[in-house]
Amino acid sequence: MANVELKLRGGRVHLPSGPAEVDVGVSGGKIVAIGDVGDAGETIDCAGLDVLPGVIDSQVHFREPGLEYKEDLESGSRSAVLGGVTAVFEMPNTKPNTDSADAVADKLARAHHRMWCDHAFYVGATNHNAEHLAELERLPGTAGVKIFMGASTGDLLVSDDANLARVLASGHRRVAIHAEDEFRMQERLGARVPGDPSSHPVWRDDESAILATRRILRLAREARRRIHVLHVTTPAELELLGQNKDIATCEVTPQHLTLAGEEAYPAIGTYAQMNPPIRSGAHRDGLWHWLRQGVPDVLGSDHAPHTLEEKAKPYPDSPSGMPGVQTLLPLMLNHVAEGRLTLQRLIDLTSAGPQRIFGLVGKGRIVPGYDADFTVVDLKARWTVDAAWLASRCGWSPFTGMELTGRPVGTIIRGNRVMWEGQLADQAIGEPVKFEAVEFG
């Protein structure tokens, strides 16, 4: 009789103490042994490969319900697992918005065993639900509350200090923030040049970002509420956030670490358009400086697909956003290969970091008792991002044709081999992620 149900054999396993050539044993969806595992019902040969804790993408927009022609929970999560991602946090700007208990329940029902990866859903803060957020943030399967200070539609925009204070006063979990100042951006609409997407970061300038980040830090201190600032694009914000780590964590995205406006807008035009914008090469270098200083806590893809037809509209009628969940890990493995960060730092940004700042239960580390979530990678594989590999319904990526070193080989979720060498399992098995704040009060 087998000692364990599944054994990962012969890989370099990235434990909290560092990498080690050890076997990992899995039973009942949990890690049960590391080292001498014994016999197994199924063995996966990981020789020559690196076994990372399952990658967590804590910011995706999968567009369901209401915008399924761009993406849905099935296609978005299929992209995720093909890219080595084992869990995602999905955002509330759908139609209708995810701003009530019924809307969360609807998303969880839609996701059940249709999503390929584990998942949680953000509740969107509005001027109308502020007093109910303390209850909403404690719903099972909820990643917490998301505030759009700028750049959103309808009710999901909370731009003034009085309503922001109401939102921050309701509840206890860390609140995710899109920090762009709506008032400044409205004043600067004239900075947009029709037909020229390179004017996007001129309109949504550095000051729009830093102003909003300063405001939310002040309001968070007054409310004594922890915040998480999403997709930071300016070095000045990271310097400021580094001085406020007691109350604020933050995220950077692979696209802001990879693309520079001087090259991206002439080359791919509106396909480089997103909020906050792709900025200059100097901005990109500044983000890397603060990343090396240890300021960003997590990486999120901000996967936000639009169709080719929508993106073909002339700026500024073109929508902002780009797909990214499938390329998050490949891009960052290439940055590791080119010496910009260590694999250990990447693991912290994509596994241990999300676990630590969001209070995930049983995810983010390879230790006995935790969920058997693994992202298996070939660090030496050289390959080119090909359109045929992309699973997002939108059908494009700003990184198509890019040559990379480092490739996701396998995605294992709670002991289930969901993806291996580009082949998916027969059945999606995604389940809601659990959080300490909800499980333990």
Image (cartoon, rainbow, N blue to C red):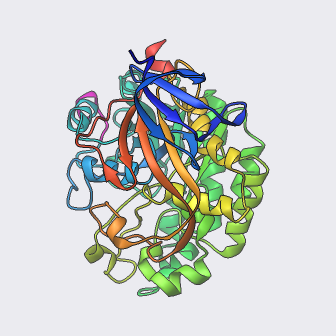
* Residue 60 image point, x, y percent: 41, 50
Instruction: Kindly identify the residue that appears in the image at 54 percent across and 29 percent down.
Output: 24
| Rendering quarter of residue 318 | bottom left
Q: What stretch is highlighted in magenta?
A: 98-103
Residue 192 lies left or right of residue 248; in this view the side is left
* Residue 167 image point, x, y percent: 47, 33
Residue 50 lies left or right of residue 78; in this view the side is right
Q: Examine the rendered structure and indicate whether residue 104 appears above or below residue 186.
A: above
Q: Examine the rendered structure and indicate whether residue 116 appears above or below residue 80.
A: above
Residue 173 lies left or right of residue 64; in this view the side is right
* Residue 435 image point, x, y percent: 47, 24
Query: Which sits in the foreground, 369 or 32?
Result: 32
Res 178 seen here: no
Furthest residue toward top: 440
Instruction: Kindly identify the residue that appears in the image at 40 percent across and 54 percent down.
Output: 421
Instruction: Kindly identify the residue that appears in the image at 38 percent across and 15 percent down.
Output: 1
Badge count: 0
Q: Examine the rendered structure and indicate whether residue 378 appears above or below residue 171.
A: below
